[in-house]
Amino acid sequence: MTAATLSALPRYALHTLLPLCRDRFADTQHGGFFERLDASHVPLPIGTKRLLVQCRQLYVLAHAAVQGERSGQGAAERGYAFLRRAYRDTAHGGWWFRASDAGEPLDRGKDLYGHAFVLFALAWLHRAFAAPDAVALAAATLDELNTNMAGPGGGWWDRADETWQPDRALRRQIPHMHMLEGLLALHEATGESRWLDEAGRLMRLALTRFYDPPTGTLGEHFTADWQPDPARGHAVEPGHHFEWSWLLHRWQVQAGVDPAAAAAAEALYATAMRHGFDAGHGGILDEIDRAGKPLATTRRIWTVTEAIKAQVARIEAAAPLPPRQPEALIAQLFSDFLQPAPGGWIETMTRDGTPTQTELPGSTPYHLFLAAAEVARVIDARAGSVTPGRSPSGSTAGR
């Protein structure tokens, strides 16, 4: 690996992305974080703040602090206070989906995707700042989901109303993927077996329902009983194949060798590498079918970050990689998505590389920072300061 190429991404994360979250996304008037910025880094007058964005921004500030850069601690503490004030449902439990800029609830629905990132943010806030009640809140949140939102066949419903009446129309793998990520983060942060036990149940669901061994693909949309959705069950996303490949590796680092998880990680990675890249135009396709046929040829920034994470996982596992990877992916990330927007990024583009969204969603720094942190661990490991296979936070808790 070329150290200079690899180190460019961690430098970007700490010297450009972190200040953007700390100084621009952070709402100094009301607390919390703005939903999105324009290309000049000015908050857009949307008037709402989603739970998901608050949690992802808190993660960035907390992970930076774990790395030794604590300049975002004040913004994180204000953001944590806003999170608890604006989104926590003290009457029914759980967390509301959307609030106003000032913190008044606008959508009191309970969204599994958002709750997954509550767990993730609380894990990192506990690790970075010993945030008051973070672990207790995470435990209460998981209890509330298991009591009120558990669905048939394992897992949870995607969404419920304020009083936990579920929407049974459709179930998706993506919020469950992030639930797994949050559970693993809590296990790393606390060393408590409860989180790993719950992650194990979710792993079994993933390997028996989401993952399809004959095609080496991962389903996105399902019916209430976890059958592929008749209308959309054929569509899969290479970006999520990469993301799951990384998560399956993290599961084994924390829980021990799991042959079924290892086989699925290898197959999902192979499918994404074989069918996910646009051979004619470059970049990673948004969506393909089970046979690898392109369904959506647009490109998004987050898919590249997930491919980088998957390749870092393979380096740790001593698995084979194509030549000049992940350096080539990092170079693509800068040339296609980061360089055209000084200090920011291009969120989406067409197949030929024409930008289609230059506004900056507050949800995207999570993808960029986590990929950069994973690359930084590889650099440190090569320099001899970090042991390969260590957790993304640098902890060995629970192992």
Image (cartoon, rainbow, N blue to C red):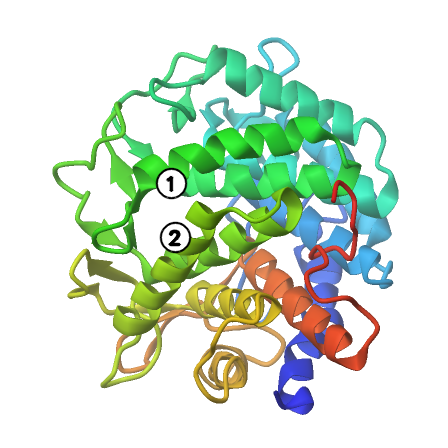
Residue, x 84% and y 72% (percent of image)?
385
In the rendered image, residue 154, in percent from the top left (x then y), is placed at: 40, 23
* In this picture, residue 128 sits left or right of residue 33: right
In the rendered image, residue 375, in percent from the top left (x then y), is placed at: 65, 72
Q: In this view, does 8 lie above or below 319?
A: below
- Quadrant placement of the C terminus: top right
Q: In this view, does 192 lie above or below 320?
A: above
Residue, x 53% and y 33% (percent of image)?
200
Residue sitting nearer the eye, 22 or 164: 164
In the rendered image, residue 302, in percent from the top left (x then y), is placed at: 46, 63
Q: Which kind of residue does numbered mark 2 sit on? A: Ala
Q: Is mark 2 on a helix, strand or loop?
A: helix
Residue sitting nearer the eye, 387 or 299: 387
Label 1 sits on residue: 207
Contact check, label 2 and label 1, Cβ < 8 Å: yes
Label 2 sits on residue: 264
Q: Is mark 1 on a helix, strand or loop?
A: helix
Quarter assignment of residue 69? bottom right
Q: Which residue is situated farthest in the left direction here?
A: 230
Q: Is residue 296 above or below residue 393?
A: below
Residue, x 68% and y 23% (percent of image)?
139
Q: Residue 63, can we see it?
A: yes
Quarter assignment of residue 32? top right
Q: Residue 49, can we see it?
A: no
Q: Is residue 271 above or below residue 163?
A: below
- The 10 Å Cα crowd at callout 1, few under 14, some 14 to 19, many 20 or more, is some
Residue sitting nearer the eye, 168 or 90: 168
In the rendered image, residue 196, in percent from the top left (x then y), is placed at: 63, 34
